[in-house]
Image: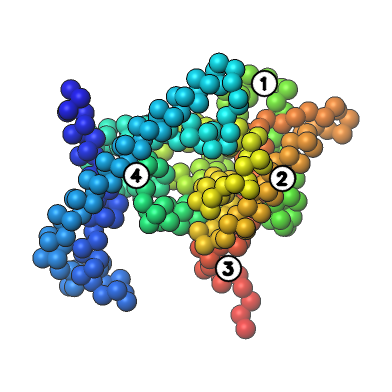
Amino acid sequence: ARAISTHMLAGTWITLLSLSGVGAAASRRAASPSSLAFLDLDEFDPVAAVKGIPGAVRDNLRIFRAGTGAMWRNRKAASVVRKRVKQGGAAASYSELLLLRKSGDDAQKLLQAGVVYLAVPELLPAMLYFFPRSLPSTFETDQRRARRYETIGRLRSKAVLQLLTTLEEDAATKKGKKGARAAARLETAKELLRAGPPPRAVGALAPYLPSADDDAKQLQRSPLKRLEGAALKAGCGAIGLSGPLPGFVRRSALRKHLQHVAAEDDVLAAALGRMSRDELLEACFDRGLGAPGASAARLRRELSHWLSLVRTTAAAGIADAAEPKRDPDPARVRLAALSACAVSSTRAEAGAGLPKLLYAKSR
């Protein structure tokens, strides 16, 4: 049974890695480097593609061995950290929290890919396209990691622009109570966009942050229960989760992501000075920040601003002036900060270049 399982996993990831780009390398090399000719069937070289298959398989086997080995080592290290914390030892550091998250996520991703491979192998390319985070972290090369960040950046910009379009459409077409709610959401969006930088923009989202004192257990289980469908879809898009998914899957994935970020924020400040550029980039994209070409200094500065933003938002409390101040739910605080940061990042990114040109004044 163990041999069958190993062969199944190997087959899954050799296929998945091939479809994600390595297997197509020979075809791309046969095309003109100065154009997108590798998409042109007239210039496609099947001989070069076939000759490149053995090399691609060897590369994929090497990545598979290295990836599964790293997953096993991470799993053992995570088990040690969990045991220490459970026994009352030192609290987990930022890097250890990241290890705990990735070790669990990577095992789940490998299992999901195995199921897809056995059930509908044709969907593997779509899985990589719609879910850029679906590849376990230990299987990522530097090139794939760079492509993932570029994809998440595009999805983030797309999510922001689509949400704004949806809000305008709802406000123009819905009637009655639904129309009133749509108009209120549109005004909130306008306030957020006019506010400018995230520290001011996040104030527009205060009404959407319920207090953790109100049914705290229910909020902990489902902090995003009342989040509207369009906003939920945009929140998922901002962290790189796209594609046709049921609402409960989106809600669960976004909730889990925000709660992980909230836990990591507690120790992030102490780790900022020691984090590598890759770690800084990962942390920024988890929070709606960053760009693939940003320097380590800029990424570190953005994360410092993020921590200040969530502290200020949480300290403000969400209550009427006549009521005592109450702390909002940590996941909803991060959702508000993520929203404001995603808008700011979209404004700064080249990925939103065409909409910028559309509204720019002609010279």
The disc at residue 216 is 1
Q: Which of disc 2 and disc 1 is earlier in sequence?
A: 1
Residue at image position (30%, 71%) is: 36
Look at label 2 and name its amino acid: Leu
The nearer-to-camera label among 4 and 2 is 4
Image quarter of the C terminus: bottom right
Look at label 4 and name its amino acid: Phe
- Looking at the rendered structure, the secondary structure element under dot 4 is helix
Name the one closer to the observer, 257 or 61: 61
Residue at the disc numbered 2: 309
Question: Separation of disc 2 and disc 3 at Cα?
Answer: 27 Å
Q: Residue furthest top?
A: 87
Question: Separation of disc 4 and disc 2 at Cα?
Answer: 34 Å
When the figure is inspected, residue 268 is found, relative to residue 195, above or below; the finding is: above
Look at label 1 and name its amino acid: Ala
Residue 230 x, y percent position in the rendering: 54, 43
Q: Which of disc 4 and disc 3 is earlier in sequence?
A: 4
Question: Separation of disc 1 and disc 2 at Cα?
Answer: 23 Å
Question: Separation of disc 4 and disc 1 at Cα?
Answer: 39 Å
Q: Which of disc 2 and disc 4 is earlier in sequence?
A: 4
Question: Separation of disc 3 and disc 4 at Cα?
Answer: 36 Å
Q: Which of disc 1 and disc 4 is earlier in sequence?
A: 4
Look at label 3 and name its amino acid: Lys
